[in-house]
């Protein structure tokens, strides 16, 4: 059995950290809409994860789908999702793999010890991405571990799937207050974070930031 990542604290007060309040029903609809997309994203993400086993963390209010796909794809993976609102966790727990662990907490104060995780993921990251979140993501990665944060369908999702959900997904994102971010804006966030690890921006199938801890 794989060890549970070391947790430094289990709760962060609502006055501190990043808290995203969103319409739970809209998030649940997005998860249902994107469910057929997550296996394609997982297949693409696997190329960046050389180890392909261990503990992965998915962060943000859209967590669960990629974790579910990764756990189904790779036998040696255990997943934990950190979500900023308890109400959102309940919807995710009902929709995806029951073997996934869920935590409520702030994304800019991750409740894990330094160098304790093998991968960190976030889809829909541009709703909340900040220098503080990037620094925390880098902190919890083990040496040689990777993080992938961003948004998009990935390059493996068939065009017919994108056409099927594209308009509704865009409308839901707009209603949830999605913040538009281009490459230059993302570079600015990364620069402000002053990361001490390798990073590269990927524009294949969306806009993604890949981190690798030395």
Image (spheres, rainbow, N blue to C red):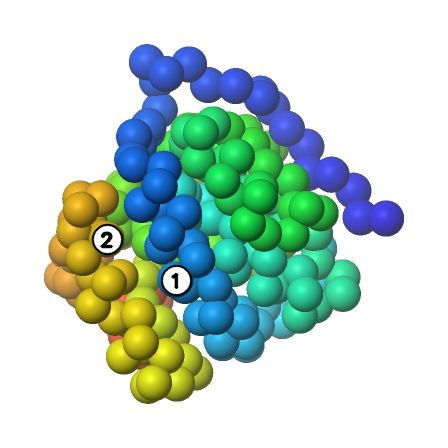
Tell me if 210 is positioned left or right of 54 in this view. left
**Mark 1 touching mark 2, by CB under 8 A?**
yes
Tell me, yes or no, if residue 214 can be seen here. no
Q: Is residue 27 above or below residue 181?
A: above
**Mark 2, other Cα within 10 Å: few <14 / some 14–19 / many ≥20:** some
Q: Is residue 77 left or right of residue 13?
A: right
Classify residue 112 as left or right of residue 133: right
x, y percent for residue 98: 68, 46
Question: Which residue is at the far bottom?
Answer: 159
Who's the residue at 18% across and 65% down the image?
A: 183
Asked whether residue 177 is in view, the answer is yes
Q: Horizontal and vertical percent for residue 172?
A: 23, 53
Residue appearing at x 47%, y 27% in the figure? 86
The residue indicated by pointer 1 is: 33
The residue tagged 2 is 172
Displayed quadrant of residue 155: bottom left
Say which label, 1 or 2, has the lower sequence index.
1
Give the secondary structure at mark 2: helix
Residue displayed at 59% across by 64% down: 69
| Residue toward you, 143 or 6 | 6
Residue 199 lies in what quarter of the image?
bottom left
As drawn, 103 above or below 183: above
The number of discs equals 2
What residue is at 44 percent from the left and 58 percent from the top? 32
* Residue closest to the eye, 199 or 108: 108
Q: Observer-nearest residue: 93 or 54?
A: 93
Q: Relative to 144, does residue 98 appear above or below in the rendering?
A: above
Residue most extreme to the right: 1
Mark 1 vs mark 2, CA separation in Å: 10 Å
């Amino acid at each position: 059995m794989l060890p549970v990542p070391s947790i430094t604290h289990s709760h962060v007060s609502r006055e501190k950290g990043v808290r995203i309040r969103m319409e739970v029903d809209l998030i649940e609809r997005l998860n249902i809409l994107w469910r057929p997309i997550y296996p394609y994203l997982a297949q693409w993400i696997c190329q960046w994860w050389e180890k392909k086993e261990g503990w992965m963390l998915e962060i943000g209010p859209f967590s669960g789908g990629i974790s579910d796909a990764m756990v189904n794809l790779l036998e040696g993976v255990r997943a934990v999702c950190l979500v900023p609102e308890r109400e959102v966790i309940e919807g995710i727990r009902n929709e995806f793999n029951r073997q996934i662990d869920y935590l409520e907490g702030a994304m800019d104060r991750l409740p894990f010890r330094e160098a304790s995780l093998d991968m960190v993921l976030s889809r829909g990251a541009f709703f909340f991405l900040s220098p503080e979140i990037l620094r925390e993501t880098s902190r919890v990665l083990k040496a040689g571990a990777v993080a992938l944060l961003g948004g998009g369908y990935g390059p493996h999702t068939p065009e017919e799937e994108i056409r099927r959900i594209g308009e509704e997904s865009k409308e839901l994102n707009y209603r949830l207050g999605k913040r538009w971010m281009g490459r230059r804006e993302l570079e600015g966030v990364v620069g402000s974070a002053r990361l001490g690890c390798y990073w590269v921006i990927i524009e294949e199938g969306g806009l993604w930031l890949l981190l690798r801890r030395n």
